[in-house]
Image (cartoon, helix red, strand yellow):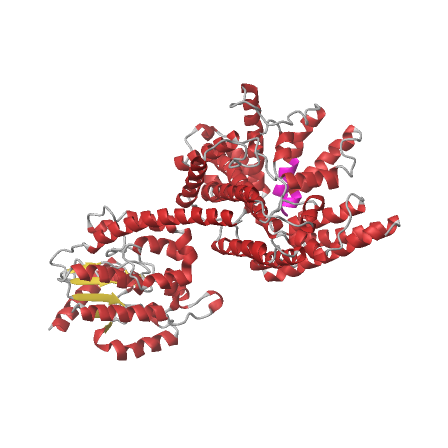
Amino acid sequence: MLFNSIEFAIFLPIVFLLYWFVFRSSLSMQNAFLVLASYFFYGWWDWRFLSLIFISSLVDYTVGLNLAHKEHKRTRKLWLFLSIAVNIGFLGFFKYYNFFLESFVEAYTFLGQPIHVGMLNILLPVGISFYTFQTLSYTIDIYRRKIHPTRDGVAFFAFVSFFPQLVAGPIERASNLLPQFLNNRVFDQGKAIDGMRQILWGLFKKIVIADNCAVYVNDIFANYQDQSGSTLFIGALLFAFQIYGDFSGYSDIAIGTARLFGFNLMQNFAFPYFSRDIAEFWRRWHISLTSWFRDYLYIPMGGSRRPLLIVIRNIFVVFLVSGFWHGANWTFLFWGLLHAFYFIPLLLLNMNRKNLDVVAKGKMLPGLKEFLAMSLTFLLVVFAWIFFRAENIVQAFEYASGIFSRSLFSLPAISSLELYILIVLMLIAEWLQRDKQHALHFDGIAIPLWGRWLVYYVVVCCIIWFTGEQQEFIYFQF
Amino acid sequence: MKIFILKTIWFFLTILVIVSGIFGITFMLASKRASNIKLDQDIHTLICGDSHTKTALNDSIIPNALNIAHSSEHYMYTYSVLKTLLANNPQVTTVILGMSYHNLSSFYDDYVFVRSKTKYMYPRYATVLTIQALPLIMSHNFEGLVVDFKDIYHGVYRHVNAEDLQDFSFIGWFYKSNRKNKNDTTISRAIGTHYFKAERELYGISTHQLSFLAKISQLCNKMNVRLILINCPLSPDYTSRVPEVFLEYYNDMKSEYGQYILDVHDFHLPDSCWGDGDHLNLSGSIVFSNYLKRALDSIAQ
């Protein structure tokens, strides 16, 4: 069920009330209830895939326990390999089987030796890219002796299947989330209220911004050959806001929902479009995934503590794998490759860790240099999004080259003033709150009660009034 | 915890009250405007139904007639429109309603219960929908009501200041079709749409269509209005492919509605008169409407 659906609007309060009123006396009952609710939530998409998440959870729970008891290095490696094989195996089969097969066939055809292989009609289980990485981080951290495994099977299953973050993240680390299942949760009104605010802001970004942008983006990308350069540029720009509204909106709803149940999930987006360089962008966009690749791929390969050429190789590998994680298409690989090329110069000039603090901290507006840096970074990101959104590599290149034509300076075909104003209002709200968790994070700000409620009502009215054509969350396809 | 729950309930309740209040006031104003629709005094015949009557019955030929048919109009909507118009227009003495084989098919219920279709229908008819329609819609398509609330509100709002007949979205009109596409492809497409779901599974008979047809009949009886259920011309190629179950059911209905039915589905027309396999074009509507004019005169006598 989508977060912005009637079913979820009914599901959430029921689960909330049962969780805090019926099951709160027993931690294990509360966790068991969460497992039940989460499996129900996941099964709503397709009950057939419950077996996958169950098997993945069972394997990693077992692997975790055995890794703790085994001392022999080879044995421990074998257990870890089992976990990796199962999780990556599931991912590889469901997500990449047909891609590799098609590419294999195309390569042979290109070489003049066409072959015919039957494709499998494989459904991609929702959230598989997220929960497999989450459970992998558990077993890898145990292998590295960074954490101890849990014997509490129910808590572990709840950690893997926790419904707010199950289908599209944040990809949680066991060291952060698992202890929260092992300790009693106490209802915190302040946390719950802020959770509701975050859900509200997430719904605004998803329903008002992302879904309304999607209408234009879908039309422009579907008919890109007939559009002017300026319209194509607007299309890419709107996609940048669509994917941001969609994904960060989902993350906000997930984090806000988790807080209603007393859980703290990691921040997944930290206002990435205010980044001053690409390195900062990747510290602010899909934080849970980039930190996962940093900790489980980049650093094990040596990270930055190797000769320069090896470091560059590591950067390329991480970005390519990150691109590939998003989908079985050459466009995603190219998108990752582009970002690697964006990143390398910063690394070579030792400027990749320059902008660590909030932009224009303590100031209302950015300086000229900061503004130009943000604009350039944003434009580079928008250009890369073209490859992310396009159906195939040929379309992506044609789209991109279509922008850079004389018609770039003509009036664009899209003139939705309402949408532009809404995007600007969102950016203003997020700019003003750029040092907070989310735009409606009012803790520590002296706003009277009536003022806060007025803001909430305005946001709700915007959601009701500007409801766009309902679109599925983009990241569900990953 | 209790304070949090109370605050949350209060928050959502306030929104519900405000939104309901705004919608309620708008609906009342629009409803009042719709209920005061006065047709020309010389309009004695209303032509209703879907695209079949919309294209076949030319109201500039049939005397004292007004064609208010809309494409894909379910009888639930037709009933709502008729109830509104007949209440304030006693000069109307005859209602000609399209009733053909496809009107019996439950594919029509998609226009009442399936969001991909109702998002166009609800805004059009919301102002006049009868109280019987609401529980039906809420039980089958509550999500459609909520998700398309904004469009429904816009649909109602535009009637608040409606002046002329064409300002009311639920009032249809005669469509002058210029098409000449009677061929196997268009006939196959129509048959597939009207009678078969995906995978060639047959649609059933729509109980909702039958129920609202009965209500229309009762309404006309109550308002002393003559009801004529017309099976507009259909090409033989189309009729030959209508599934048997719908042909049989239609024939059975003649025993229930016999005195009302004017079955002219086999009215002969040359190919040039067909827009496609089950719709007439302008030429066809002229020929057929002239015939119907004579037929109505003889019925009146």
Q: Residue at x 47, y 43 (%)?
A: A223
Give residue B263's position: percent from left, percent from top: 25, 73
> In the current view of this chain or complex, which residue is farthest to the top?
A368
> Does the stretch in magenta take in A120?
no
Identify whether A119 is placed above or below A287: below
Kindly tell me whether residue A191 is visible in this rendering: yes
Q: Quadrant of residue B54?
A: bottom left
Name the residue nearer the viewer: B56 or A257: A257
> Does the stretch in magenta take in A333?
yes
Give residue B286's position: percent from left, percent from top: 20, 61
Asked if residue A380 lies left or right of residue B185, the reply is: right
Asked if residue A381 lies left or right of residue B36, the reply is: right
Q: Dominant secondary structure of the magenta stretch?
A: helix
Asked if residue A136 lies left or right of residue A263, the reply is: right
Name the residue nearer the viewer: A148 or B10: B10
Kindly tell me whether residue B284 is visible in this rendering: no
Give residue B253's position: percent from left, percent from top: 29, 77
Identify whether B108 is placed above or below B152: below
Q: Quadrant of residue A338?
A: top right
Name the residue nearer the viewer: A477 or B47: A477
Name the residue nearer the viewer: B182 or A126: A126
- The boundaries of the magenta stretch are A324-337
